[in-house]
Image (cartoon, rainbow, N blue to C red):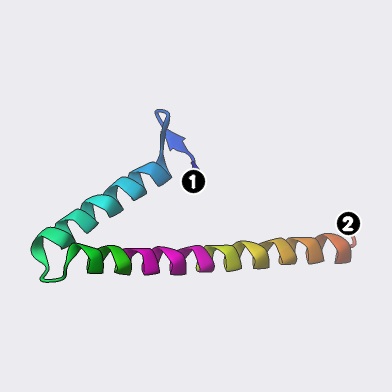
């Protein structure tokens, strides 16, 4: 529950559920095979993870730089 929760239900869980529903619809209605759709989903998720990791690493670095360079420390 990274984003938080609402009535003890994680927002990220809602996103994951919606993504799985979309994948199931894609498998049903596209001419791609289930394996193709799953492979594309894993590639997309891997890319998402890389983007998120990069973002948080840069945010951490900026926070550390601010703390060490700040006149308020």
Where is residue 27 shown, x and y percent of the image?
A: 16, 61
Q: Residue at x 79, y 61 (%)?
A: 64
Residue lying farthest top?
A: 7
Which of the labelled discs sits on residue 55, or is there none? none
User: Observer-nearest residue: 22 or 11?
Assistant: 22
User: Which residue is depicted at the point 28% across and 62% down?
Assistant: 38
Task: Tell me the crowding category of disc 2: few under 14, some 14 to 19, or many 20 or more residues within 10 angstroms, Cα based.
Answer: few
The quarter holding residue 68 reads bottom right
Tag 2's secondary structure? loop
Number of callouts: 2
Most common SS among magenta residues: helix
Residue 49 part of the magenta-drawn span:
yes
Q: Nearer the viewer, residue 62 or 24?
A: 24
Q: Position of residue 33 (x, y in %)?
A: 16, 67
Q: Which residue is mark 1?
A: 3
Q: Pointer 2 and pointer 1: residues touching (CB < 8 Å)?
A: no
- As displayed, is residue 8 above or below residue 63? above
Nearest to viewer (mark 2 / mark 1): 1
Image point (39%, 28%), residue name: 7
Examine the rendered structure and indicate whether residue 9 appears above or below residue 54.
Answer: above
Q: Which residues are magenta?
A: 41-50
Q: Is residue 14 above or below residue 70?
A: above
Task: From the viewer's perspective, tell me whether residue 53 is left or right of residue 60.
Answer: left
> Could you tell me which residue is drawn at 41 percent across and 63 percent down?
45
Residue 32 place in picture, x, y as percent:
15, 70
Determine the image quadrant of residue 57: bottom right
Of 7 and 49, the residue lying toward us: 49
Disc 1: CA contacts within 10 A as few (<14), some (14-19) or many (>=20): few
> Can you identify the residue that label 2 sits on?
72
């Amino acid at each position: 529950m990274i984003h938080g929760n609402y009535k003890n239900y994680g927002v990220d869980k809602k996103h994951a559920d919606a993504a799985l529903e979309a994948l199931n619809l894609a498998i049903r209605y596209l001419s791609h095979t289930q394996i193709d759709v799953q492979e594309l989903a894993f590639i997309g998720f891997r890319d998402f993870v890389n983007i998120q990791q990069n973002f948080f690493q840069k945010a951490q670095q900026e926070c550390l730089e601010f703390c060490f360079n700040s006149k308020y420390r």
